[in-house]
Amino acid sequence: MVIGWGEFFALASALVWALAIITFRRIGETLPAFELNLFKNCVGLVLLVPTLLFVEGAAMPDYSAADLSIALLSGFIGIAVADTWYLRALHLMGASRTGIVASLLSPFVILLSVTFLGESLVGLQLAGFAMVMSGILLVTWRSNRREVEPEQVRKGVLFGVGAVFLMAVGVVMVKEILETRPFMWTATIRLVGGIAGMLVYILLRGRTGRVVQAFRQPQPWFMLVGGSVMATYLSMIMWLAGYMLIPASVASVLNESANAWIVVLAWLLLGEPLGRRKVVGLALTSVGVTIMLLA
């Protein structure tokens, strides 16, 4: 496979995302998942707006009502809900398990791309999907009960699988718009949709006081801002750029390198155990996504 700009952006976004996840995990639960997601998205928007004005200018392109609605809905699904669930899984079962469960992203994207974008799926890709699932089950099923409570693992897996499925839905539904409309405008609109959805949720559920109180508590602001810049600005721009430049099924598989980075960095920087189950599970998921890429 020749490495072009699309492949480069997909791989680079994976590394930056892994560093952001390790940063958030190192912070711990100083901010609940919802409030952490809201904070990182707001930091991303503060950086995206001046970038947008510099790159594209202030004149908004002529989006159809349908395209605008899809971009906003994609942000709500893939940023507001999916990222919150991902961060919740991170808190429940640690970075390495969450990273391996996130290997389901590329199979989900491939299956959705086949269904809605007309991309092809061959038999070997199904075998790769089975290997990814086997690796995830090996790592999460009755493993290391002394390290993490079984109930936490169970809930973490549910949140993690739900998160990566919604991420896949969000990016597949906006792929055509990314390819046909100005990139930075689409990325910004998508992020606005995510933040707006979270703010509406806060108002409807009467959580304003709870959110404000969370941000009044002492926080490791330097690490929070650093992780947010990596997750919602640098990684997101490169992630979407990869999907814009190359087929969604290829970009999603290249993004899976983030999972290997997360497992290794969690071991090196967070001291999370790197036992035989995790090594074999990571190997299975890595081989599985490689088969899906090369098939």
Image (cartoon, rainbow, N blue to C red):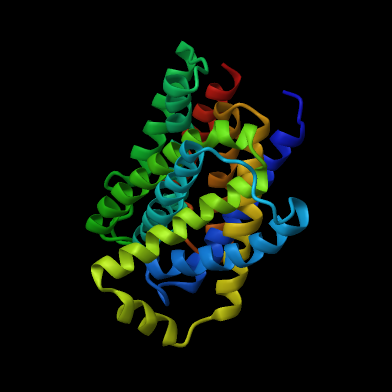
Q: Residue furthest top?
A: 123
Q: Residue at x 24, y 55 (%)?
A: 150
- For residue 175, which quarter of the picture? top right
Q: Looking at the image, which is closer to me, 182 or 143? A: 182
In x, y percent, where is residue 88?
A: 36, 60
| Quarter occupied by residue 36 | bottom left
Asked if residue 50 lies left or right of residue 275, the reply is: right
Q: Nearer the viewer, residue 33 or 81?
A: 81
Q: Is residue 273 visible?
A: no
In the image, 217 versus 161, the foreground residue is 217
Task: Name the foreground residue: 220 vs 117.
Answer: 117
Instruction: Please provide percent x and percent y for residue 52.
Output: 69, 56
Q: Is residue 193 left or right of residue 222?
A: left
Quarter of the picture containing the C terminus is: top right
Residue 134 visible to the viewer: yes
Residue in the image at 70% along x and 56% along y:
58
Q: Quadrant of residue 18?
A: bottom right
Q: Residue 273, image x and y in percent? A: 46, 58
Q: What quarter of the picture does the N terminus occupy?
A: top right
* Residue at image point 43% right, 60% down: 196
Q: Could you tell me how many numbered marks the image carries? A: 0
Residue at 58 percent of width and 24 percent of height:
293
- Residue 195: x, y in percent? 46, 61
